[in-house]
Image (cartoon, helix red, strand yellow):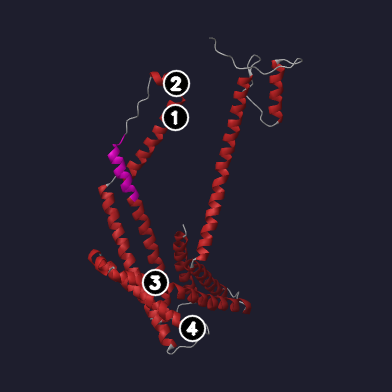
Amino acid sequence: MDQQTPPRTPVLGSSTPDSEIKKHQDTLVRNGLGITGCIPATSTSTLELSTCIKTTVNSEAAAMAVAGQLIFPKAVLYGRTVSRVIKLLQSANGLDKIIRTIQYTSRLISHVMLLKDLHTPTTSTAAAGIRRQFGLTRRLLRCFNNLGQINATINLIRESRQRISNDFTGYILDLIEGLGYTGFGIADSLGYLPDAGIMGIPYKAVVDKLAFHFWLYALVASIVGNVVKVIRFRQRLGKYRTIFPTVAQAAIESTSHQVESTKETSKENSQPLQVMQELPPTPPDSPIPVTQVSVNDAALSVVKSLEEQQFNTGLNVVGGTADIIFPLAALKFSGFSSLSDGVMGFAGCISSAVGMRKAWRATA
């Protein structure tokens, strides 16, 4: 039985198949679907014309997909940034860092304007208002953060046996830091009441001085503990680089091998089916054994993680060193009580930038 041929386009009495095909082509051009390089011959059937139309539609869809890939990531990135900003503003810690940045930036700018003789009574009043009101706002926000700090300190005390057996020095420093921030939060909250005009407390000066003492102890423990952590991170990184001296090179070779394998696969897929059946492709030889690549990749990920932790811990050391100026100046230590607003504002800007970075990363 003969194979059936596809039905042809119905032809009117006063038209020919060629004119009908030409009419379809003109309609496609008018609708914006111009077919280039896909014009069927005079003797071709409507089935071939349908194939050309499908090819054109697929090319249009591919172009729209490429355009979507170029536009959609920008919208996604913008949406993620907005959501992170909202999270930052909704968190008490993030709002505290934003207010702190504005507070110390205005203090630094005020000192610079004073040196340049640019101060006016208006700007002086504004700088003093920002310094006082923003300081009170931050103290109010810290009142709510004390509960979390107290809970963290209690959990740290509960884990004393396990932490002491693993790392005695680190545990003692963390405990001093936790107790220092807890005491500072309680004393600072009590001192906020008379400053805000809510109620008076006895021995107000003693409470304020005690709060700065607690803050100083917490900062000293934090700086020493972070310095110890940085040293340990460097030691661990040195061990990894000694054990895996070619970690980076192995990762580069592994990546290049994957790229070459992808290129070979694409070439093989582009070959005709008959050639692929006659000559099946052979996988390229790997320049590195599979076990070595996996181990080096794992070591590379560990090294990157350790480097990131070392960098973040170093930033904490910088922020703590900048912050320690304030309790030393408040407690009138020798050489710190006479620091200018410019030095205090600059130190506050540095520590605020470190805290802002940490709060921003917490919203990811």
Q: Give left or right: position of 161 versus 329.
A: left
Image: 163 above or below 123? above
- Observer-side mark, 4 or 1, equals 4
The residue singled out by tag 4 in the image is: 193
For the residue labelled by badge 2, is the local secondary structure a helix, a strand or a loop? Answer: helix
Q: Earlier in the sequence, mark 3 or mark 2?
A: 3
**Disc 1 target residue:** 266
Residue type at mark 2: give it.
Answer: Leu
The image quadrant of residue 10 is top right
| Residue 168 - label | none
Per the model, the C-alpha gap separating discs 4 and 1 is 72 Å
Number of numbered discs on residues:
4
Q: Nearer the viewer, mark 2 or mark 1?
A: 2
Residue situated furthest bottom in the rendering? 202
Looking at the rendered structure, the kind of residue marked 1 is Ser
N-terminal-most mark, 2 or 1:
1
Q: Residue 37: in sight, yes or no?
A: no
Q: Position of residue 357 (x, y in %)?
A: 46, 62
The answer to whether mark 3 and mark 2 are in CB contact below 8 A is: no
Q: CA distance from mark 3 to mark 4?
A: 20 Å
The reply to whether the C-beta atoms of the residues labelled 1 and 3 are less than 8 Å apart is no
How far from the left and from the top, in percent, is residue 3? 55, 12
The residue indicated by pointer 3 is: 149
Question: Closer to the N terminus: mark 4 or mark 2?
Answer: 4
Give the residue type at disc 3: Gln
Label 2 sits on residue:
273
